[in-house]
Image: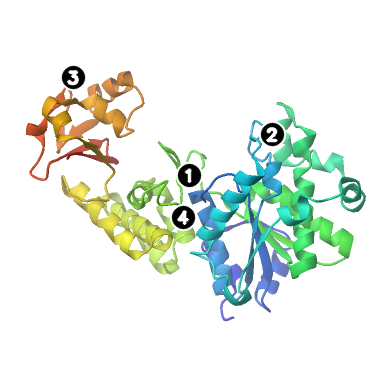
Amino acid sequence: MSTNVYDVLTERGFIEQCTNPDEVRELLGGEPVTFYIGFDATADSLTAGHFLTIMAMMHMQRAGHRPIALLGGGTTMVGDPTGKSDMRKIMTRETIQHNADCFYRQLSRFIDFSDGKALIANNADWLLDLNYVEFLREIGVHFSVNRMLTAECYKQRMERGLTFFEFNYMLMQSYDFWKLNQDYGCTLEMGGNDQWSNIIGGVELIRRKEQKPAYGLTFKLLTTSEGIKMGKTMKGALWLDPEKTSPYEFFQYWRNIEDVKVEECLGLLTFLPMEEVRRLGALQGAEINHAKEVLAYEITKIVHGEEEAKKALEAARAMFAGPGNSDDIPTTVYSGREMEEGVDLITMLIAAKFCKTRSEGRRLILDGGVSVNGEKVTDFAKVYTAADLDEEGALLIKKGKKGYHKIKAE
């Protein structure tokens, strides 16, 4: 391995915290290392937040190391209290297994699981049949309650009330690391920076129980300049599943991020060389839009493939140039009869999910935030009929600078 992947991850901005950084760097510069990242199966698709950790896995695998993707079939039944003000909703085993299967299919797009180059595991295989008394004797004895209560993930919940149910989570995640260490020689756990306390628990468990070295490394979390987690849209999470977030919507999210976040996201979420990342990140004024376009294209290409990325790019350019006619723009279809009779603008805005209520739609229009076919509309009672459609039989609604939606009649 010519370039140490630890240096690659550092230069690209991934690493937030690391146990024994010099030792980890030396470890990653030598023989192939088996490492793991856990994914609790709380939904039926991975999100943009997961994508950062997937990129790190890809860098690690490209450097010759072996990833284990651990699906949380067992831990999801408890729920990690980290960053949560309330206890997670308890899910059925069947739902969790379905979600885990969806994760595996998505991860297989990014990680090569052939010929043992990467492994998939599910902690339901060992957690669900544990004997609790044996677990306490073998594992619980190594954990100090006093120390656990100082962990950030528990401190945030103490005021609202932390259940004993959730208090077990750190022990379970630590047990996962120990189990993977025993079965597969896994010596490194990686994850988001909010997982630091849980990762340290596993590192120390292996060191105490086995007197063997183990290491932990966390990645920075994707946040806006206000510190809010990135990947949230008007419709909720930014999903990697094209059925839940279309490639066009996915592209548009990254095309419209804050200027100050462009260089960071280029480093973390694309494979562009760092010289190009820094060149694009240094662009100013209107030129930064080119950097955003490159960012959106590169991320969409990794997640959805080159063809979908090209389609999304063309659709976005058509939008910025004026009314376009691309099938990749989110579209609402009305019948020819409905359009003959007329549909009011606020109804269209609600259908486009640009507003939730009629009063919100009225305010949006009065504030000058809506244009139709390139013309700003200030009449909140405006009704559009078939006569208003362009030659393609469509209307293009634009909300602010970022939102586009097509209305078609069929």
Q: Which residue is mark 3?
A: 381
Question: Residue drawn 68% across and 39% down?
Answer: 81
Determine the CA span between mark 2 and mark 3: 47 Å
Quarter occupied by residue 408: top left
Residue 353 visible, this orientation: yes
| Sooner in the amino-acid sequence: mark 4 or mark 3 | 4
> Viewer-nearest of labels 4 and 3?
3
Question: Residue drawn 74% across and 66% down?
Answer: 187
| Sooner in the amino-acid sequence: mark 2 or mark 3 | 2
Q: Position of residue 296 (x, y in %)?
A: 36, 55
Callout 3 secondary element: loop
Q: Which residue is mark 4?
A: 264
> Viewer-nearest of labels 2 and 4?
2
| Sooner in the amino-acid sequence: mark 3 or mark 1 | 1
Q: Which residue is mark 2?
A: 156
For label 4, the crowd category at 10 Å Cα-Cα, with few meaning under 14, some 14 to 19 and many 20 or more, is some
The colouring scheme, among rainbow, by chain, secondary structure or one colour, is: rainbow
Q: Position of residue 21 (x, y in %)?
A: 69, 64
| Of the pair 72 and 50, the residue shown nearer to us | 72
Q: Which residue is mark 1?
A: 230
The type of residue carrying mark 1 is: Met
